[in-house]
Amino acid sequence: MSNHMISKSTEEESKYVRTKLIEFNASQLPDDIKNRYEEINLNIKDENNQIIGGVLSVLCWNWLEVDILWIDQTQRHQGHGSKLLMEIERIAREKECTFIKLNTFSFQAPNFYKKHGYQVIAIIDNAPKGHKHYYLMKELV
């Protein structure tokens, strides 16, 4: 039996592991999508040039993943979230993505996304404790 050791990774070691997985993944994909990775981040500002909302997302291969969609609490229910979501969907279609995926918690906005045509694909109960963690997806083609 060999003597392998597990240790906490340095930043450089973590980057190495990530790079090796990316290389492997790329070797399994067709050339037209293997190098598709792009951050797409948008925001909405008020008349004073203050950010009142934003969306942070990543285009990866043939989909777009929304990491964060946030609207300032004082600016909610005015259509800003819908505008951001519709714009990110437009960009995803323009870039020939086949679907968008995202996640949200029961105390955030699962009904907002459902209203916009997103389908629940998984729910984890008690994550975080006392709440649900929703995974949603919307087909674009």
Image (cartoon, rainbow, N blue to C red):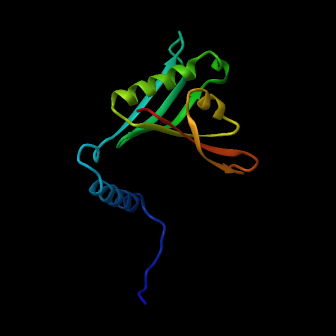
**Which quadrant of the structure image shows residue 113?**
top right
**What is the quadrant of the C terminus in the image?**
top left
Q: Position of residue 9 (x, y in %)?
A: 45, 64
The reply, left or right, for residue 69 in relation to residue 27 is right
Determine whether 70 is above or below 18 in the image.
above
User: Which residue does the image show at 53% across and 9% down from the upper left?
Assistant: 47
Residue at the farthest front position:
141
The reply, left or right, for residue 134 in relation to residue 85 is right
**What is the quadrant of the N terminus in the image?**
bottom left
Residue at the farthest left position:
31
User: Which residue does the image show at 39% across and 37% down from the upper left?
Assistant: 98
Q: Position of residue 89 (x, y in %)?
A: 45, 27
User: Which residue does the image show at 66% across and 34% down from the upper left?
Assistant: 108
Q: Number of marks in the image?
A: 0
The reply, left or right, for residue 133 in relation to residue 67 is right
Q: Position of residue 120 (x, y in %)?
A: 60, 41
**Which quadrant of the structure image shows residue 5?**
bottom left
**Which quadrant of the structure image shows residue 77?**
top right
Determine whether 94 is above or below 20 in the image.
above
